């Protein structure tokens, strides 16, 4: 599981990262709402933790923008003690759960694990992903366009799944490496380039109008071309 923490109290944020690490959960911490939003929109996290009170952009606004962009990642909000209005705003804006400060470490871990299981179950229960004229069978690792279909290898499948789930959004090579190969992986940009090349050929083979476009200096995006 990979968790994002948006918390401006540096000591608390560092402590949470260490707590999660000891429990075999990878966590990244960001100290303001703008950085939190940018990283949440990558779609690489399984659970997002948002503190309501943050500089630059508060947690409620971050949450609203995340949901407006179609990011369905489960969100746990930190709220101040006895602030019922904060809890209501958070839940109304799309939060999945909340935790009042100060909190017990065991309760935080339990809630994050529960949200992580919910996220995984949603992916498992969605066997078919559709984007434009292509479909991806996540149970059979099969990519199809009309009557044409083929099997994908594990890494090909993982890259295509991430691109389809983020259709129209540019994904950086760093994002692809982190999500597919892992944060501590030795994978390099050319690993991503190789699999993008494989997938482009396979999209052509099944005669799809979809194309993986390179955004120079940024990354890749899956789009549907007209007139093909």
Image (tube, rainbow, N blue to C red):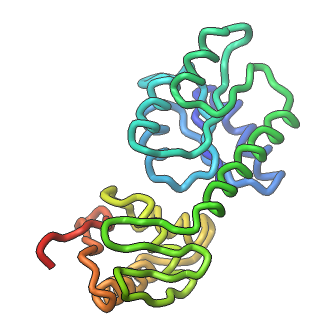
User: In the rendered image, which quarter contains the C terminus?
Assistant: bottom left
Residue 188 percent coordinates (x, y): 47, 77
Percent x, y of residue 103: 81, 25
In terms of image quadrants, where is residue 108?
top right
> Residue visible at 31% across and 66% down?
132
Percent position (x, y) of residue 193? 37, 81
In depth, the one of 95 and 215 nearer the eye is 95
Q: Quadrant of the N terminus?
A: bottom right
Name the foreground residue: 100 vs 85. Answer: 85
Q: Residue at x 83, y 52 (%)?
A: 23
In the shown orientation, is residue 92 left or right of residue 21?
left
Whether residue 45 is situated above or below residue 157 in the rendered picture:
above
Q: Left or right of 78: which side holds 36? A: left
Residue drawn at 33 percent across, 88 percent down: 206
Relative horizontal placement of residue 219, taking residue 55 as reference (left or right): left
Residue 197 in percent (x, y) is at 34, 86
Depth check: 144 or 210 in front?
Answer: 144
């Amino acid at each position: 599981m990979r968790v994002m923490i948006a918390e401006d109290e540096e000591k608390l944020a560092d402590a949470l990262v260490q707590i999660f690490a000891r429990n075999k959960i990878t966590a990244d911490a960001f100290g303001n709402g703008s950085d939190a939003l940018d990283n949440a929109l990558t779609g690489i996290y399984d659970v997002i933790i948002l503190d309501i009170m943050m500089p630059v952009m508060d947690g409620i606004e971050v949450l609203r923008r995340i949901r407006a962009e179609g990011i369905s990642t489960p969100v746990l909000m930190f709220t101040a003690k006895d602030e019922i209005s904060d809890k209501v705003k958070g839940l109304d804006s799309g939060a999945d759960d909340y935790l009042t400060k100060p909190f017990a470490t065991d309760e935080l871990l339990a809630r994050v694990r529960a949200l992580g299981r919910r996220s995984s179950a949603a992916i498992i229960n969605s066997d078919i992903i559709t984007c434009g004229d292509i479909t991806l069978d996540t149970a059979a690792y099969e990519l199809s366009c009309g009557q044409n279909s083929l099997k994908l290898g594990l890494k090909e499948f993982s890259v295509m799944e991430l691109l389809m789930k983020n259709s129209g959004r540019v994904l950086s090579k760093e994002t692809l490496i982190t999500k597919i190969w892992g944060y501590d992986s030795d994978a390099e940009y050319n690993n991503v380039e190789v699999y993008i090349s494989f997938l482009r050929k396979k999209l052509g083979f099944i005669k799809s109008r979809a194309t993986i476009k390179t955004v120079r200096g940024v990354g890749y995006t899956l789009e549907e071309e007209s007139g093909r």
